[in-house]
Amino acid sequence: MASRIHPGALGVTIFCFVLTIAFVAGAYSKASDLAVLRDGDPAKPNADTVPKLLEQRTALRREIAALESDFRVRRQELERADIELSRNLVHWQQRELLGGIATPGRETAVIRGESQRLKRHRFEQARFSIEEISKRLDAWRNEYQSAERQSFPQLDQAIAARNRELSEVNQRIADQDAQFQRERSALLERLDQLKAEKDKLEKTQAAERSSRLTRIAQLEDRIRKLLGREFKWLTELTPVGQIVAVEPRSNRAIIDLGARDRVFPGLLFEVFTVDKGGYVEKGMLEVIEVQADISVCRIISQKDPKRLPLAKDDRIGNPVFDPRRPRVFVIAGEFERFDPPELASFIRRAGGIVVDKIGPGVDFLVAGARSEREQTQAREYILLGMTEEQLLKYVQPHFVPQAGGRR
């Protein structure tokens, strides 16, 4: 059985379809009108469009602003002119001249080409002036007390922004001040520590300085003692051997030094003894025969053969000769009999060594004239000095200088 369509539902459906078509057609028409209003109609180039209307509105607004500005300027000019006329006692009330400056003897004035009679009522003039000034003051008061004059949004915003910046700056200042106080406290503590360390170091340095000064004083005393020593000359010999036998008849003596002690013929020895703690010179010996452990010497001189004859156990010595090691000499200055090279050769023949400068290991300084500097150095090294005559006594007492060898 086929279903039947209800006539009412079919009508409603047809009506909705027709209404939809009408709405779409209207919307399309309106869209076309809007497009024409927005973009313009090619068939009507002079018709108004939205961009043209917007441009006209902008132009009108600029024109209104210009007119308002011009109006304000005109108004200010009128106010200034009114003030200037007031100064000249010219007063108007609408189109009636109440008072002004007139030529003496006349009661009329020519204003705008018309002859008008001046009213010389000073009371009216004053009242009118007061009313006009009051109106002007009221207008100015209303203008300056208006909401537009009392409200400054940009200024308020700038003030608020500046207040915020000021608050931030104050906060940063407070933070920096707190940090500064903390760092200051830490630095003060560190300063106290450094002061304590400084005091401790100063005490230590003071103690060290005192100790060093004491040591320096001791050394200076020692130096003064060393420098204050006089330059000592050779007065006594150190014994290097002794006499073992004396033969007065043959004028011979035997000593306990031989070839093993580096003794050689021609070597001279001084004979001496110690009597009551004093050095006593007795004579001189010259080696003439050398054996292994002993040597035979010739007696070449005696100080006092009767009272101080040479005897067994008398000591012998020579400053140039030492069986243990060669003696070291420095020759300085000017001499009467021989040149320094000749004296050096005499020392070397006797078994000694000659060097150029005074220093450690030197035993004697053979000092002549103008040898003060060397004598000062010898005093520092505690050396003994010898004169030219003393040296010749122990090296070549019988030596005859050659021609041209004297000084």
Image (cartoon, helix red, strand yellow):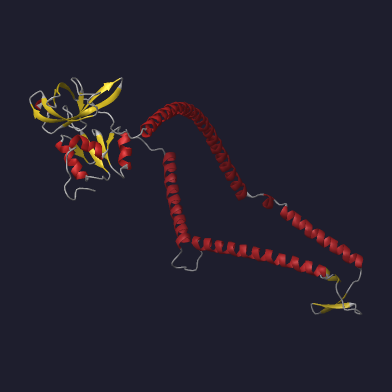
Q: Quadrant of residue 318?
A: top left
At a point 14% along the width and 32% down the height, the residue shown is 267
At a point 18% along the width and 24% down the height, the residue shown is 241
Q: Quadrant of residue 110?
A: bottom right
Residue 76, image x, y percentages:
71, 65
Closer to the camera in the image, 205 or 222: 222
Closer to the camera in the image, 219 or 260: 260
Q: On the rendered structure, is 243 left or right of 371?
A: left
Residue 249, image x, y percentages:
13, 24
At a point 45% along the width and 65% down the height, the residue shown is 41
Please say whether residue 345 is visible from this viewpoint.
Answer: yes
How many labels sit on residues?
0
- Up-down: is 155 above or below 276? below
- Up-down: is 130 above or below 183? below
Residue 179, image x, y percentages:
51, 33
Q: On the rendered structure, is 362 left or right of 256?
A: right
Residue 20, image x, y percentages:
43, 47
Please say whether residue 357 is visible from this viewpoint.
Answer: no
Q: Quadrant of the N terminus?
A: top left
Closer to the camera in the image, 290 or 323: 290
Closer to the camera in the image, 77 or 346: 346
At a point 40% along the width and 30% down the height, the residue shown is 221
Q: On the rendered structure, is 221 left or right of 262?
A: right
Q: On the rendered structure, is 57 left or right of 280?
A: right
- Up-down: is 125 above or below 317? below
Q: Residue furthest left?
A: 291
Q: Quadrant of residue 219?
A: top left
